[in-house]
Structures are given as C-alpha cells and as structure tokens.
Amino acid sequence: MIANQHQKGWEVIYHRAHALLAAQLAGHWNAKDRPIRWLETIAAISHHDDLEREWEGNHLTEAGGPLDFTLPTNKKTNPETLRSHTQNARYRGRWVAMLISMHMSFLTEGKRGESPELDSFLDEQLENQKQWRKELNITKDEAAEAYAFFEWCDRLSLILCNHELPAGERALEISSRLHNTRYDVIQRKDGSVTVQPWGFEEQEFTVRVEACYLDQMQFESNEELTEALKIAPIKTLEWTFIK
C-alpha cells in the first residue's frame, strides 16, 4: 500500500489502485508514439501490482502505522512469491508476462547476490524474456521500448499518489528512459499539471485514483488496520493535465 501521513492520521492508496492510475495515464498517450501491442501493454500496466495483496503478511511499521511499500524492511525478497506473480501474468498472454517479468527484473536485479534462490529467479526471468521475444517475433529493442513506457507510466502514477509534485511550479523528472528523452512533470499555480515535453494525445484530460482515510495514527495489529480500512471514508483524488 501507499501510506501518506496527514493531520489526523493516514491516507492509504492501494497498490492496485495506483496501477490503474498508471494505466489511465497510458491510455491518453499520443497514437503515433504508442508501443506495439498497445492494449496488451495497458493490460500489463493495469495489472502489474497484483502481487501486492494488502491483507497478506505484515502491514504495520514498528510504530504501529500502515507500512508504506517504500519503507525498508528486514524481510528478504521471496523469489517464489515473485515467480508466482510472473507465472500468473502468463495467463494474460506472453506479451503481458514479458513486461511483468521485465518489471520484476528492474525491481530486483539490484539485489542479485542476496541469495542463490534470488539469483536463480533473476536468471530465469532473463531466459523467459528471451524466449518470449523469440516466440512473439519481436526485437529486444521493441521490448525495451514498451517497458520504458510501462515504467514511465508507473513512475508518474507514483509521483501523483505520493504527492511528490513540487511547489512553486518546479519541474520533477519522471524518467529519461523513454525515447531517450527527459520528461518532467510540473504542477501549475492553478493546480493543473503538465508534462514537458507533452506526449499525450489530448490537450487536456483528467485522471483519478481512490484513497482511504484513517483518523488514527497507530494500530495494535494488522487485523485492526484491516478493519479500519474496510470502514474508512473514501475520496477520489483527481489531477487535470493541460498542455
């Protein structure tokens, strides 16, 4: 989950809601620059965080607050959990599975050496990606271009969900991997958002995500947090993008 502290407690955005926001952003991209297998790419973006199951495992910090996914933990990466995610993605097709596999590689390659099991998983993903590219008759560059777009949408969604837009109309880099171009996001004084360079089809559009609001700072157990989130008020956050 994504947990943002506010004056009375916590704003919580589920990972799968963040992924849906990323897919909304992808859906507005201009037609001439869309990667191949467009709808399947959007499906991969929309489902890429299905691995995050909010009610499984521990979701509290040592202080008793909701555990934001960015906070470091002592728990080692579980290759079997990651492998299950990539295997489940296969049921949506090899293109979706390939992009999800590339995302797993992107997120965990830096942990290579943590365990033999993890190294084996990482090697397996590279082999899977190679095999799927061959079966789908696509080049490594075409796959890389599609994943760069995937990662771009994911990153911009996280910036929005984490309220990272800088004040004072300052620019924040989204990514420089897509088209080998640096893209920046800027929030204007009127609250609208723009991206430079502009890569979307429309001159103006709005995207949304739902967030839950908790009015307490600490919880005694995961069960207490779970019950609180089930009855928490929900608000829709919106961002209007204008060229």
Image (cartoon, rainbow, N blue to C red):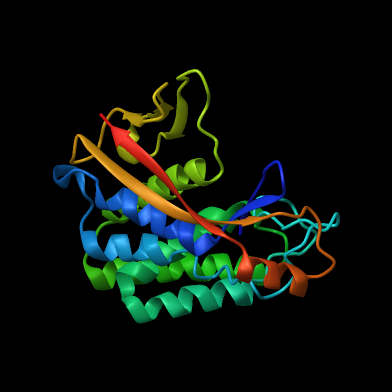
In the displayed structure, 159 sits above or below 169; it is below
Q: Which residue does the image show at 32% across and 66% down from the upper left?
A: 43
Left or right? Give the position of 109 relative to 184: right
Residue 223 horizontal/vertical position (percent): 75, 75
Q: Nearer the viewer, residue 165 or 86?
A: 165
| Quarter of the figure with the N terminus | bottom right
Q: Which residue does the image show at 77% across and 56% down from the upper left?
A: 65
Q: Nearer the viewer, residue 125 or 93?
A: 93
Total labels drawn: 0
Left or right? Give the position of 151 relative to 70: left
Q: Nearer the viewer, residue 160 or 30?
A: 160
Residue 226 occupies quadrant: bottom right
In the displayed structure, 141 sits above or below 163; it is below
| Quarter of the figure with the C terminus | top left
Residue 152 occupies quadrant: top left
Residue 52 horizontal/vertical position (percent): 57, 67
Q: Which residue does the image show at 77% across and 62% down from the upper left?
A: 60
Left or right? Give the position of 83 relative to 99: right
In the displayed structure, 34 sits above or below 186; it is below
Q: Nearer the viewer, residue 17 or 71?
A: 17
In the displayed structure, 52 sits above or below 186; it is below
Residue 193 horizontal/vertical position (percent): 37, 31
Residue found farthest to the left:
32
